Amino acid sequence: QVHLVESGGGLAQAGDSLKISCAPSGRSWPIQGMAWFRQIPGKDREFVASIKWNDDRTNYADDVRGRFTISKDNARNMMFLQMNRLKPEDTATYYCALQGFGTVNYDFWGQGIQVTVSP
C-alpha cells in the first residue's frame, strides 16, 4: 500500500503565496503521474493540477493556471504545488493523488491538507 502525506498548508491572506508538498511512503509504486485536487464542504472534489512523471507534462484547471505551479522531485518521489496570488476562493482541503503506471485512474489519495485564504 502507498500512503500519501501532504504538508505545508495553513493560513494565508489574499495575494500571499503558499507551497504544499506530497510525499509517498510505504510500498514503492511505479508512478505515471500525480495530481492535486481540492474540495470545499458541500461541493465535489475538483481537479487543480497534474504532472506526468516521465516527461513533466503539466495540466492546470483554468482558475489556477498562471497562479499555481506543480512540480516534482524525482529523486525523492515528491510533488509540490506552489500557489501564488492566492484568493479566498482557493480556500479548500487539498488532496494529493497518485496514478500508477499503466492505469487511468488515481490509485492512491492523501488525507488532505487545509488551505485557508482570508480576504
Image (spheres, rainbow, N blue to C red):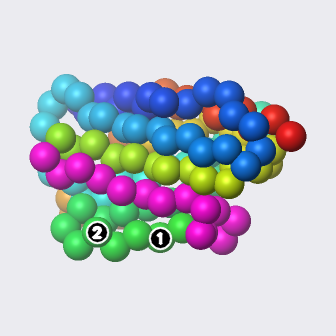
Residue extending farthest to the right is 119
- Residue in view at x 64 percent, y 34 percent: 115
Q: Please name the amino acid that badge 1 sits on.
A: Asn
Answer with left or right where residue 41 lies relative to residue 4.
Answer: right
Answer with left or right where residue 78 lies relative to residue 108.
Answer: left
- Residue in view at x 61 percent, y 62 percent: 67
Q: Can residue 98 be seen in this view?
A: no
Residue position for label 1: 59
Residue extending farthest to the front is 16
- Badge 2 vs badge 1, beta-carbon distance below 8 Å: no
- Residue in view at x 48 percent, y 60 percent: 69
Residue 41, position as x, y percentages in the image: 77, 34
Disc 1 is placed on an element classified as: strand
Residue position for label 2: 56
Separation of marks 2 and 1 at Cα, in angstroms: 10 Å
On whether residue 100 falls in the magenta region, the answer is no
Residue 71, position as x, y percentages in the image: 36, 56
Q: Give the range drawn in magenta.
A: 61-75
Quarter of the rendering occupied by the N terminus: top left
